[in-house]
Image (cartoon, helix red, strand yellow):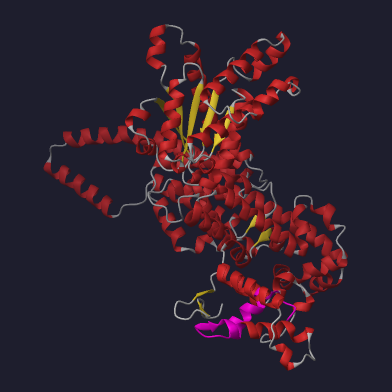
Amino acid sequence: QQVQEDMNKQLFDNLVSFLRRSHSEFQERTTEWTCRMKTREIPTAALVLGVNVTDHDLTFRSLSEVLQDNVTPYIALLEAKDCPGVKNLMQKLIGQLMNCYVDVDSLEDEDYVQVSQKRVRCSMTSLISWYENVTKKTDSETPSKKRTSSSRHWQSPPIVVVIKDMESFTTRVLQDFIVISSQHIHELPLVLIFGIATSPMIIHNLLPHSVSSLLCIELFQSLSCKEHLSTVINKLLLTAQFPFKLGGKVLQVLINLFLYHDFSVQNFIKGFQLCILEHFFSQPLSVLCCQLVDAKKRVNILSHNQCENIRRLPSFRRYVESQVSEKQIALLTEDSCLKEVIQKLLEDLHVYHENYVPVLRCLHVFTSFLPKYPLGKQIRELHCASLENRVWETEEYESSLQLARMLNKSDLITMLQQCVEILVSSSGKDFDKTVEKLKDFLTQFQKLEEEAFQERDVSVSSQKELQKKTDLYHLQKTLLELKESRRSKKLTKFEMLRFEVVDYIDSLVRSYLVPADHKTLHEIAYFNTASVLREHLNAAPRIALHTALNNPYCYLENQALKCDGGSISNKAPDICIVYKLHLECGRLINLADWLEAFSTVVMGAERPNADPASSDQVDDVIHARFIRAVSELELLGFIKPSKHKADHVARLTWGGC
């Protein structure tokens, strides 16, 4: 929420400025000529938010809070589903406006309550009279109250109507509302805000020119959802402040869902929250993740069972195998020795996180100056590549180094300056020598520029001397020397320094961007089970439905529902019994046979010694239960009535799940 507010601050400030200009124009309409010219134009803000519709609700909620705190208490948020007609729109508009005006001193005022309860007065005339009453009431307050209210809201504050989903509104409803509002704009300071998901051209597609000419439109563009996602990843994932981390495959699953499904940052955050829940629920040692920064306090209170769980971690096993035999025995048998080592390993893991992010940002700066982006243009792509593999062993990284060895001097200097800023502002403790080395590179580049100016003067003088030598022998000798020097051309000082810079950046990458799964105890902080995340986020309704109907114990966890694979329990819900019986049938199912089989299963335990003659008489209650179960099965899409035989139904699903 804080990231969302920070990103939308500029947008909301621009909207407030637009409302201020519109409100000042309304207050300055004094002359008759001004009223004639602008009396029918409604100030309108076209707010383009993008196709990530699921994120719009939070944006409008934040916008409403900003406007209520700084501009006006009279705000109405309208959706197309609530406004099928102009009458419904006016009811929603007037209802929200009158309910939003809640003054502590007027809660017990009977007139106010009566006005808010009268639904018959849903017209523009009643809205104007209500606005005049509330503004007069505000003007007649005591000076102290008036001073308090004016500090938050403007004098005669405007009425802001937010159309949240303009594309979904009926054309006729919008046209009628705009025409009616324009006729009363000289009496009511009305401002419209259109929430647009596609393009501003939708305004002209929905509204004819005679209606759109009644709007004084100004366009506002929010940040793209991709920029929003990049900011969220930078604030939440690429930081050592939060010890919980996502593995490379898990992060790639969330990013793919974002890019190929809905572009919703809110759904990305929900997936991130789901990863947190799964990690802390399924990993017994995740309690150490919360105390990753202050490992000493948590390690000292580890129980013996937790120590045993640590010894079972694959990364810790590899660490133990790399130690000498005496150390291995102590780690596997003595809890005190294990706690000391765990404390050091957790501190090393935290230092790894502190150093990883700045170097990753430096690598991103490094690749952003390249003409192509073999490793990806976004920092999240670099992050995923670094988490999954040794990034320096990939072909994309090698091609990036080759391109980097052809960068010009200005790009290299700018890149080094940005890297110095990143490393100086980072929380890493091992970057003092690195910063000194980068600054030394910058100093060498400055010296090269000074030497280049001197060499340029020398070359000019040598050319002049060459022009003075008119002797053919000396001229031919000089040209041969130049030709020979070009054949055996050596690297210039700039090229050697450029190679040195690239090699040094490469050494930083190899030192600090080691994949997380190579670090000991990474299982404590990293969630890597992408398959579990896919099961939750990639919906498979048919498989879930088949599992629920074929094996209800999987969801209900009732011991009475446990049964073998082929048997049918009479304790199961009726729809489960009907479903398992229909799996044994062919394309057409005889309802009479189906009912008989259902009654046999249901009555099998209830009447084990029943008379065979009486079993032919199906109880009315069982008959009703069967009809209801078959209807539910038809509603779920497993069967449909047959056109060929009235007493049969057709089966619609085939194959195993």
Residue 138 image position (x, y, % from top left)? 66, 14
- Which image quadrant is residue 547 in? bottom right
Residue 458 image position (x, y, % from top left)? 30, 34
Report the label total. Answer: 0
Quadrant of the snapshot with the N terminus: top right
| For residue 75, above or below residue 517 | above
Determine the residue positioned at 69% across, 54% down.
Answer: 244
Residue 146 image position (x, y, % from top left)? 68, 12
Residue 92 image position (x, y, % from top left)? 57, 34
Determine the residue positioned at 76% across, 92% down.
Answer: 611
Span shown in magenta: 570-594
| For residue 93, above or below residue 629 | above
Q: Is residue 568 visible?
A: no
Determine the residue positioned at 59% across, 22% down.
Answer: 71
Report whether 473 appears left or right of 543. left
- Which image quadrant is residue 167 in? top left
Report whether 129 appears left or right of 353. left
Q: Is residue 297 magenta?
A: no
Q: Is residue 579 magenta?
A: yes
Q: Nearer the viewer, residue 198 or 140?
A: 140
| For residue 29, above or below residue 653 | above
Q: Nearer the viewer, residue 620 or 247?
A: 620
Q: Is residue 474 visible?
A: yes
Quadrant of the snapshot with the C terminus: bottom right
